[in-house]
Image: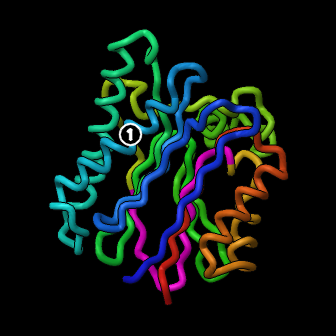
Amino acid sequence: MKIRAYGLSQTGRGRKCNEDSFLIAPETGLFVVADGVGGNYSGEVASKAAVDEMAAYVAAGTGGAALAGQGKGRALLAGALAEANSKIYQLGRSEEKYREMACTVVAGLLDGDELLIGHMGDSRLYLVRDGRTEQLTADHTWVNEQVDSGNLTSDEAKTHKMRGAVTKAVGAEERAEPGLSSVRIRPGDYFVFCSDGLTDVVQRAEVGDTIARLGPKIRKISETLIELAVRQGSTDDITVILIYAVK
């Protein structure tokens, strides 16, 4: 399966540093978006550590080459997330300046014609296929849990004061319990990995509409999505990785 990929990250309006990090590693087929959480607790250090640890772990496990349907990809991706979690958890307890730092992660690992998916927190992955846009990850957030249990409606969740509270994050606990899934890739598919700087203000339908209008210009799509988020009021750091499965 031939793919094209492009990534872009922009510091939020009025912020001194970008707490998002991302990785595109075509040699191993690993893609990661990480978003630091915790305000002043070195979120940028956590997100960078997550990306670096995952990249090194997958490269060691594959010998620096892409997987080819060997059946070990799911365990490899889970191990990479666990390694990143351990690294950040230990760093967060080694120095006061790193106290309680953590990050959200959404990651994809190519394994032949399958995309293996791992995530923790509220960074998301969308699939745009045949004009339909589907969210492939479920947000690990307090408000999402309340919606699932029937205590909040989707509309109430969008404006709730707790909407930014994540229930899982890499480095927050000693052990990681990521969401793991997979999807078979079809020619013409678009995959959008993104931080909540985008999804807090840009709706799922708008992501699909942008791709329908600009595809397959993946760089232009990425730039346009970030511009749309800023125009619609995002002040958070915004990161997008776009993957296109070439027809």
Q: x and y percent of residue 73 in the render?
A: 25, 61
Callout 1: few (<14), some (14-19), or many (20+) C-alpha neighbours within 10 Å? many
Name the residue: 61% across, 33% down: 17
Secondary element at tag 1: helix
Quarter of the image for residue 158 reads: top right
242 or 77, nearer to the observer:
242
Residue 109 in sight in this render? no
The residue identified by callout 1 is: 50
Q: Residue furthest front?
A: 16
Q: Is residue 98 magenta?
A: no
Q: x and y percent of residue 41 in the render?
A: 52, 20
Q: Is residue 188 magenta?
A: yes
Name the residue: 29% across, 48% down: 78
Left or right: residue 24 versus residue 140 is: left
Segment colored magenta: 181-197
* In the image, residue 208 above or below residue 140: below
Kind of residue at badge 1: Ala
* In the image, residue 202 above or below residue 140: below
Name the residue: 35% across, 24% down: 89
> Tell me, what colour scheme is on the image?
rainbow
Q: x and y percent of residue 161 in the render?
A: 76, 27
Residue 11 in sight in this render? yes
Q: Residue furthest top?
A: 96
Total marks in image: 1
Q: x and y percent of residue 171 in the render?
A: 39, 28
128 or 14, nearer to the observer:
14
Q: Residue furthest bottom?
A: 247
